[in-house]
Image (cartoon, grey):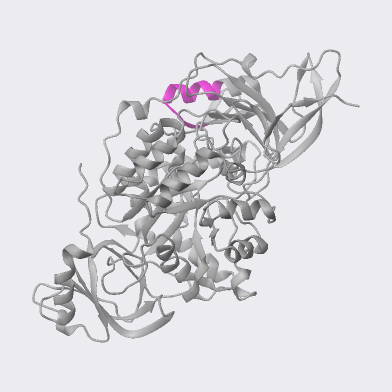
Amino acid sequence: MEYAPFPSWPDVAPRLIAVAAGREAADMVIRGGIWINVHSREALPDHSIAIAAGRVAYVGPDATHCIGPDTQIIEADGRYMIPGLCDAHMHIESGMLTPAEFARAVIPHGTTSMFTDPHEIANVLGLDGVRMMHDEALMQPVNIFAQMPSCAPSAPGLETTGYEITAEDVAEAMTWPGIIGLGEMMNFPGVIHADPKMLAEIAATQRAGKTVGGHYASPDLGPDFAAYVAGGPADDHEGTCEADAIARVRQGMRSMMRLGSAWYDVESQITAVTEKGLDPRNFILCTDDCHSGTLVNEGHMNRVVRHAIACGCDPLIALQMATINTATHFGLEREIGSITPGRRADVILSSDLTDLPIEMVIARGQVVAENGAIKVDCPHYDWPDRARNTVHLGHALTAADFEITAPEGANRVRANVIGVVENQAPTQALKVELPIIGGLVEGEGDVCQIALVERHRATGGVTNAFVSGFGYQGRMAMASTVAHDSHHMIVVGTDRDQMALAANRLAEVGGGITIFRDGEELALVELPIAGLMSDSPASDVAAKAQKMVEAMQACGCQLNNAYMQHSLLALVVIPELRISDLGLVDVRTFEKIDLLEPLA
């Protein structure tokens, strides 16, 4: 299906003017509501909105002059009329859904604009995959803007991706209609050290007049941070404390505070506004990563706004952070982010400004959802076979592929172990003494094995290491082809036979997530598109994902949103310790390190 470009303001300006002046009738009038004006930060009662050609033509106390015999009238009945919510930074693939199904899931929650970085699929399918995501996004009835991924691989020399993104790819993408800027610049050491490739990507973006996304995953706020900001990134979502938020806005960045399925970084940073009194227009709310279960059961940006309010933020300020602040940051203040003349008519009706029930959603002048039910179609892209056949192991795996051979003559050994931190992206670099049984190093207590299985080029490569924090018990294994950012296959388990079963199962189904215990498959989430996404409805994917969560719990894991922790264990740009197809990586120094160390 071809997408129909949304008419630009010049295309419809004569009609908007005529409707506002009363010379022509509006297509729709929303009558008698409380107008949330995010420009002036006011709640203005007894106002009406006139909409024509998918845009706002008039807002005022009386829109009678805009009403004709064919005008659709919607009675607000004193409810709040709120701009459609914007997610400033997110990855559709993290929902395990295609853009169409992601849109279908979030529209009833009031999200009408998304700024998505498809760097997950870029790692698997390169520029071709980005184009597929971009094209399906443009087919949707809401605004999905894409940022061209910047870092595939995220850390050159420390991982191998299915494809590499080049500066030439970035320059080409900047000419596409739905590209709004450059995706998060995760290779912050590359920027700090003026890597020519990274600077070429940033330059191509800035020459196109578009926004460079940031990703500074370091606690160092000294000269390195200043060097990163000088390199061009305009925002950052990796802050985890108040000092991070303050440092970013003081240096001219927008501080993006995220509440995803596993990232809870709003409460610890929003005090920069609520207690320190910094200008809230430089703060933005986002989700970063939300899986399908969160979307179906808890919400999307409405969940983030409610959380910000619960953390003490004024509701009008929280709404600014999820609407006009985002639009302004991306240079779209004249298009989205507010209910004012000329803007796209993206409106939420809600009876409460604190709990924020989403009772009606209007996008581009069309009722798209009401009381949780979607009212429009979300068209699907015709995903080709090359996007559905991406798991290539080279050979069927056996328990022997997951063996970690001990140094000759040793009884115990010290291992560098990845330590999972609940509700946060960073891990800990642990050193743990482990036993040797039959010449092999074995996990003990809470320490189990982790493996990174190469799946892009059928090399048959397996990197083995250890991880702590999941609490797994018994003979089990969990495997996933969602393995940020290189998206090989991560297998975590307490038993090597179960690890082989899980890995081979994902090769059989073309990607996804599976959990085995004692030879039995407890849960399976099929993700056939790039091994990352399903084109099934979000409710179906969420139901399978819930079984996956329950299976993890049955195997002893009690962490909140543990699957998100699992999927990030190969993300070699976030400290402290990660695994890649090239080995164990200390992200504090961006160097590979040995898994085992001799005991003194």
Q: Residue 417's x, y, as percent?
A: 73, 34
Q: Residue at x 58, y 65 (%)?
A: 249
Which quarter of the picture shows residue 554? Answer: top right
Q: Residue at x 71, y 38 (%)?
A: 589
Viewer-proximal residue among 440 and 221? 221
Give yes or no for residue 509 being in the magenta stretch.
yes
Give yes or no for residue 541 being in the magenta stretch.
no
Q: Which residues are magenta?
A: 501-514
Q: Residue at x 74, y 28 (%)?
A: 443
Q: Residue 36's x, y, as percent?
A: 38, 77
Tell me if residue 334 can be seen.
yes
Q: Residue furthest left?
A: 69
How many numbered marks does the figure carry?
0
Up-down relation of residue 296 to residue 415 (above or below): below
Viewer-proximal residue among 320 and 184? 184
Location of the N terminus by quadrant is top left
Q: Residue 323's x, y, as percent?
A: 41, 66
Tell me if residue 533 can be seen.
no
In this picture, residue 7 sits left or right of residue 242: left
Q: Residue furthest right?
A: 600
Which quarter of the picture shows residue 121? Answer: top left
Which quarter of the picture shows residue 570? Answer: top right
